[in-house]
Image (spheres, rainbow, N blue to C red):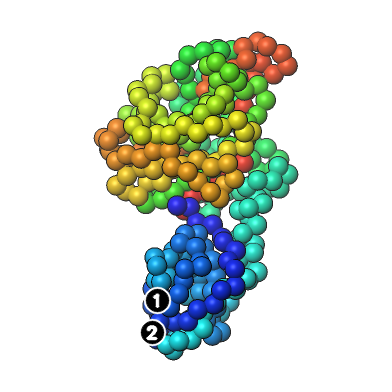
Amino acid sequence: MARYERIVNHVATTLNGAINDTVTSITVNNAASWPTEGDYRLRVGSEVVQVTSRAANVLTVVRGVDGTTAASHSDADTIEPVITATGLETYFNHAVGYTSRTRDSRLRDIDGNTLTAADWSFDNQASSFLENNPDGTISLISEETDTSGATLNVVYKAAPTPPYTVTACFQVGPGMKWGANATTAGLLVRENSTGEFINVACNLSATWGVNRWNSPTSFSAAVSGSLAPEAHSPFFWMQIEDDNTDLFWRGSYDGLNFFELGTEGRTAFMAGGPDQVGFQIAERAMGTTLPHGPRHEVNIRSWEEV
């Protein structure tokens, strides 16, 4: 899962065994009240550690964070949740930055570089184009007049070296087609050598789905086991994880709580495995119907690679 900051109730416990200043696996006596995923911060002595996962009473941690220094600690020392400035900033960057309609957005690659329209290439550009917005978001815009059919406008860039997770927030823009043959938009992984890709897309009429494509104009098949919960929202989050063995697709309505949509081996469809990531919009629009037709768009409000 993508990492995000958690706010944890103040329930203290004690260390189960002494630790030195380098170990990153800490056993405590009772961690049942703490989350198993997401990041949160604990204080032991003068040191703050960042918990990245929990399995029963074993914590995986980053040592000496938030300006503190890693140190040795004794058996039965108290370890307890703590709120820090860095933790709060990280929390609000996710919980507020992803959902706000006014806050400047963050589109970053795995190295922290800002992404703009110039960083993407097109597959089946047709009459579509990318547009940089003043708030840092990027819009994928199509001016096709087709109101049916299976044709996509795809943009892509190089993927990070696996394992990685990409999480993106999409905002439905004007002119998107609802109802029968509704417009779709979503996140994808692509194989450069063949042009094949798999996308997790939201059908703006009702559902989500994970689909294989031979090309932007040639649909292959739905990924077995993909789910389709109701959508009906102008904002939606999508996530693709490549752990170098399998691909996982997830969706969310708030950017924090994700549900599984499907999974399969990373070479089950693309023989060489995906080496690009991107997003797409369907050419299906309102035709020439006013006020927006034929222009329709989706806005990428956030993009995170970890």
Q: Is mark 2 on a helix, strand or loop?
A: loop
- Give the camera-side residue of 265 and 122: 265
Residue 192 seen from this side: no
Residue 218 location (% of width, % of height): 38, 19
Residue sitting at x 65%, y 50%: 97
The residue where tag 2 is placed is 17
Mark 1 near mark 2, Cβ–Cβ under 8 Å? Answer: yes
The percent coordinates of residue 2 (x first, y second) are: 48, 52
Q: What residue is drawn where x is 41% and y is 71%?
A: 57
Q: Name the residue under label 1.
A: 27
Give the residue drawn at x 47%, y 68%.
32
Are there few (<14), some (14-19), or many (20+) residues within 10 Å of tag 2? some
Compared with 174, 63 (above or below) is: below
Left or right of 219 in this view: 13: right
Q: Which mark is residue 107?
A: none
Mark 1 / mark 2, whichever is N-terminal: 2
Q: Is residue 63 above or below residue 266?
A: below
* 258 sits left or right of 178 in the view: left
Q: Give residue 228's position: percent from left, percent from top.
A: 47, 32
> Quadrant of residue 276 in the image?
top left
Comparing 151 with 260, the one in front is 260
Query: Residue placed at 55% from the left, 26% from the top?
Result: 206
Q: Can residue 223 be seen in this view?
A: yes
